[in-house]
Image (cartoon, rainbow, N blue to C red):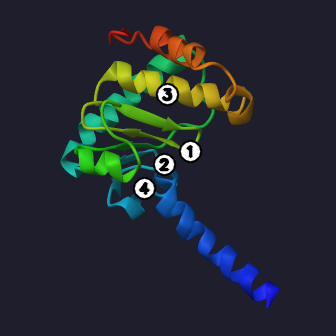
Amino acid sequence: MFKRITLIALLLMPIVVWSAYKPVRVIVPQWNGVSCVTEQICIESPEKSEQAKALYDSAMGFVDEFVGEVQNNPRITFCSSAECFGAFGFRAPAKAKTVGVSGIVVGPDGWKSHILRHEIIHHLQSEKPGIFRQWPSPAWFKEGMAYSLSEDTRNLT
């Protein structure tokens, strides 16, 4: 009986995690109704794929040249609606969110070069020292680094 309950619990775990912790959805964004136009770019509105590719290439080039080389290019999901962004567990006022090294979700107001560079720097912060080593770093340090190095134009106050 214990083995049967354990097996059922193990089989249900992915469903529970998918339902309860929405940011995990960046791993398979297609299950959230977006289309992946490349291995690294998924998008809610396919007609905007060229704009997304240009933003991605520009931001990756900037980070690689001026901040540090990204070892594993992040998968970025570009949402055009608040509903799409919310389906991944995020909402305004956030413009975009990075989920460790699993992926980045860009909201409808986040389609800007400096915002994408900012999020790729967060990806790099997780990639270089590792997610668990950088986790205890103070938020002001992680955010300050991302704002400064990305040439982010948003007002911090």
* Quarter residue 40 falls in: top left
- Of mark 1 and mark 4, the one earlier in the sequence is 4
**SS state under label 3:** helix
Q: Where is residue 142 in the image (x, y as percent from the top left)?
A: 57, 18
The type of residue carrying mark 3 is Ile
Q: Quadrant where the C terminus lies?
A: top left
* Residue type, mark 2 in image: Pro
Residue identifier under label 4: 29
Residue 14 location in percent, x, y? Answer: 58, 67
Q: Residue furthest right?
A: 2
Q: Earlier in the sequence, mark 1 or mark 2?
A: 2
| CB atoms of marks 1 and 2 within 8 Å | yes
Q: Residue beneath label 1, please?
A: 102
Which of the two marks, 1 or 2, is nearer to us in this view?
A: 2
Label 1, label 2: how far apart the Cα atoms are? 9 Å
The disc placed on residue 23 is 2
Q: How far apart are marks 2 and 4 (CA)?
A: 10 Å
92 lies above or below 59:
below
Mark 3–mark 4 Cα distance, whole angstroms, equals 18 Å
* Left or right placement of residue 7 versus residue 62 in this view: right
Task: Tell me where residue 98 appears, x and y as whole percent.
Answer: 49, 35
Q: Mark 3 points at which residue?
A: 120
